[in-house]
Image (spheres, rainbow, N blue to C red):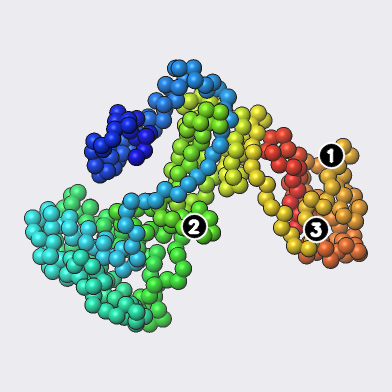
Amino acid sequence: MDRRWQLVLDCLDEEKAPFSKATLVRFRAALITKGLDRRLIERTVEMAEGRKGFCSRNLRAALDSSPLWGAARVEDTYNLLGHALRKALTVIARVSEKELATIAAEAGASMVVASSLKASLDLDWDDPMAKAEALGDILNVLDEVESWLEKQTSLEGATAEMVKDHLEVGRQIEAQDVESEADGSPKLKQGVAKDRRIAIEDEEMRHGRKSRRQRFDGYKRHVLKDLDLGLVRAVGITPGNVPEASVAEAIASDLQQQKVVLQELHIDRAYLSSSLVRERSEELTIICKAWPVRNGSRFHKSAFTLDWETGLIHCPNQVQLPFSEGKVVRFPSELCAKCPLRERCTTSKKLTFHGISETPSRTGFPPKAYFQ
């Protein structure tokens, strides 16, 4: 269905799919493992340069992100704990050449063998008391498996480390999702822990938000597109819960390999704190939608006039003070207290402007001044 993959796999416009979707997934995974996913982009740029399709030195580009859903199963705390336990016991069963049910019974963890952990517990999941009891039972099994494992002298080397890693994942889930009642019994924490792990099979998947209403589980993909030719020039992947600005290093690395000079970059406000903006050259123009004016019935910063020729700032009551670029300006509290327009100004006792700068040619913004 995707012509880009048809082109890569030499089956462009084939009416019948030459392989299954699972084959494509495995192929993509192999590409990523060998670093060849990056090479695809690099090779595309090389071919375009060789055909004189564009000038690689000066670039007008747009950078934006979109949700990239993870492929691993997202589970609640109970199933995450059970999944981690099952993986640890599966390693032992495979090495010892025994059935998983046999190993689980020996370790006192028969509940994790069932196709559904919650079904095996046979509780009323609408009852808060039953849910608390289930959590305690699962954590007790985790303790029992760890104790049983210490006695297994036949497990050593890489196998023992693998089992230990899976059990540590269980403890990670406990630490992020579970707290103790006053009597010492476990209960689920309220809210979501910072950087909470949501899947066993993919440890880097995270809850993310593209907007207040749109939530996703997985990653954010960031794509830098050449505005003149439509080519994708750089890409980056970040966990779903990190700020967009964190991808700047990966994007800059891709552009550096291509020996590209960014001259114009279109972004949304999520990227304003990135190094692409903060450490930009004088030649780079940043185009971004300005922050909305929201100050209720009180004066907004635009009500204060900056006279760059005289170096004076004028308040709505025409009080004037000198300013210097990048410096802080404070209006005296005694003047503000007597001002007839005080009710419409900031609620702070004194008016302070931070980091005044004139940068319209480089950022696409008007001169800025933040006050409190």
Which residue occupies 53% across, 31% down? 226
Q: Amino acid at mark 3?
A: Phe
Q: Amino acid at mark 2?
A: Gln
Residue 308: which disc? 1
Q: Position of residue 213 (x, y in %)?
A: 51, 60
Where, by quadrant of the figure, is residue 125 drawn?
bottom left
Q: Quadrant of the N terminus?
A: top left
- Quick one: label 3 or label 2, which is nearer the N terminus? 2
Of tags 3 and 2, the one toward the viewer is 2
User: What residue does disc 3 label?
Assistant: 299
Q: Quadrant of residue 366?
A: top right
Label 3 residue SS = loop
Q: Residues within 10 Å of mark 2 (few under 14, many from 20)?
A: few
Give the residue at x 29% y 76%.
Answer: 134
Pointer 1 or 2: first along the chain? 2
Q: Secondary structure at mark 2?
A: loop
Measuring from the top left, give residue 248's x and y in whole percent. 52, 40
- Comparing 9 with 216, the one in front is 9
Which residue position holds label 2?
214
Which tag is nearer the camera, tag 1 or tag 3? 3
Q: Amino acid at mark 1?
A: Trp
Q: Is residue 306 left or right of residue 212?
A: right
Whether the residues at callouts 3 and 2 have beta carbons within 8 Å, the answer is no
Q: Measure the alpha-carbon separation of dots 1 and 3.
A: 21 Å
Compared with residue 50, is residue 282 higher up or lower down, i.e. above or below? below
Q: Is residue 252 visible?
A: no
The front one of 9 and 170 is 9
Residue located 75% across and 48% down the image: 369
Q: Which secondary structure, mark 1?
A: loop
- Label 1 with label 3: CB-CB less than 8 Å: no
Name which residue lies at 40% across and 64% down.
176
Q: Position of residue 269 (x, y in %)?
A: 61, 47
